[in-house]
Amino acid sequence: MKTYVAADEHGTAIAYTDRKRWLWLASLLYPLQPFIGIVLHARTGNELWLLLPILLNYGIGPIADWLIGEDENNPPEAVVHQLDQDRYYRWLTWLVVPLHFVTLAGTAWYAATASLSLPAFIGLAAVAGMVAGLAINTGHELGHKNSKLEKTLSKWVLAVPAYGHFSIEHNRGHHRDVATPEDPASARMGESIYKFALREIPGAFARAWEHERERLVRRGKTVWHTDNQILQSFGLSLAIAVALVAAFGPIMLLFLLLHHALAYWQLTSANYIEHYGLLRRRDADGKLERCQPHHSWNSNHILSNLVLFHLERHSDHHTHPLRRYQSLRHFPNLPTLPNGYFGMYLLAYVPPLWFKVMDKRLLALPHIQGDLDRLNIDPDARPAIEQRYAVHT
């Protein structure tokens, strides 16, 4: 294990070892999951094997997160610069990019050539789309960096699920408006994930397009100029689609439709749980308070954090968006999820259970203490919420 040595603010020598250093390699295995089912199907002929990654993620994953537990270990601030400069960690985010292209090509080839039943075809496309959700997460990690290489890799990997507008809206819009009613990617208390999706998915695209239009206008260019970063990524997505249709026929249009829809759904699932019900307040002059660590839900569950590049340490990400995943820190007494993201996705898919578990956690947070005025509440759900809970002003 590599040890980083530095001096703290008092001049005292400190040493830090990332105990998860080699475990981060799990992030390279995640996109390849569909090939497990493909190999087992090829050997047995049983089409149910194609769905194995769904069981691994949503059945075994949450249980494993619970059994393995959490890691609250933090890198000391004095070694963060060294940790950020360690190229091993960034190589992992770079290497996972071509793996997403390999998985898309491999699953598309098998779906088109293996004489699958329609349900099996749909299932394989869904599984491929599920892991392509991590392509958006990889684009998220890369898109926050100032490196031209990493921004280019972000654009490429976002082309796999045809979500090329993500970094535009996420960096310029979501990080500015997070935990406010104006942000389409911040879920409101009492808002189901299904209602949220209808607001978040089109809202994110519309805002991204407007951000990019404004940028191009400032440079004296039209929104349809070749410098449009959204069009560049979608152009690559179109090239991928044309290549797959040319290679395997029109059936690829259905495959890609399902693939992209499931990838979008993975991002929507993450967005839904990350800021549910949390609200940044405005002062008497209408000025929005600065985003604080208590404006994000967090999880330190080890397994899901390893494959999601520490996305679940979300508060520190919003505090230091340029900080690399291996350096993100845990903070005590923050909004905390009872399981990793995959377990929380399952809970969110059943809104009554989600509300039962999360609304009580939301109201019990130290900075809220049952005060509904401190929450981002769905206007349609507010009357029922006020009736259910005591109103504090």
Image: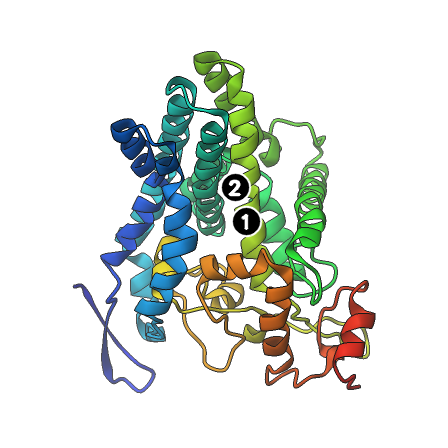
Q: Nearer the viewer, residue 131 or 101?
A: 131
Q: Is mark 1 on a helix, strand or loop?
A: helix
User: For the point 69% across and 67% down, which residue is it?
Assistant: 189
**Left or right of 252 in this view: 221:** right
Task: Report the residue that reaches farthest toward the left.
Answer: 1
Residue located beneath label 1 in the image? 267
Q: How is the image coloured?
A: rainbow
Q: Nearer the viewer, residue 323 or 37?
A: 37
282 lies above or below 216: below
Whether residues under marks 1 and 2 lie with C-beta atoms below 8 angstroms apart, the answer is: yes
Amino acid type indicated by mark 1 = Leu
Quadrant that contains the N terminus? bottom left
Can residue 183 be spotted in the picture? yes
Amino acid type indicated by mark 2 = Ala
Q: Which of 382 and 139 is in front in this view?
A: 382
- The disc at residue 263 is 2
How many numbered tags mark residues here? Answer: 2
User: For the point 39% across and 49% down, which residue is it?
Assistant: 55
Q: What element carries label 2?
A: helix
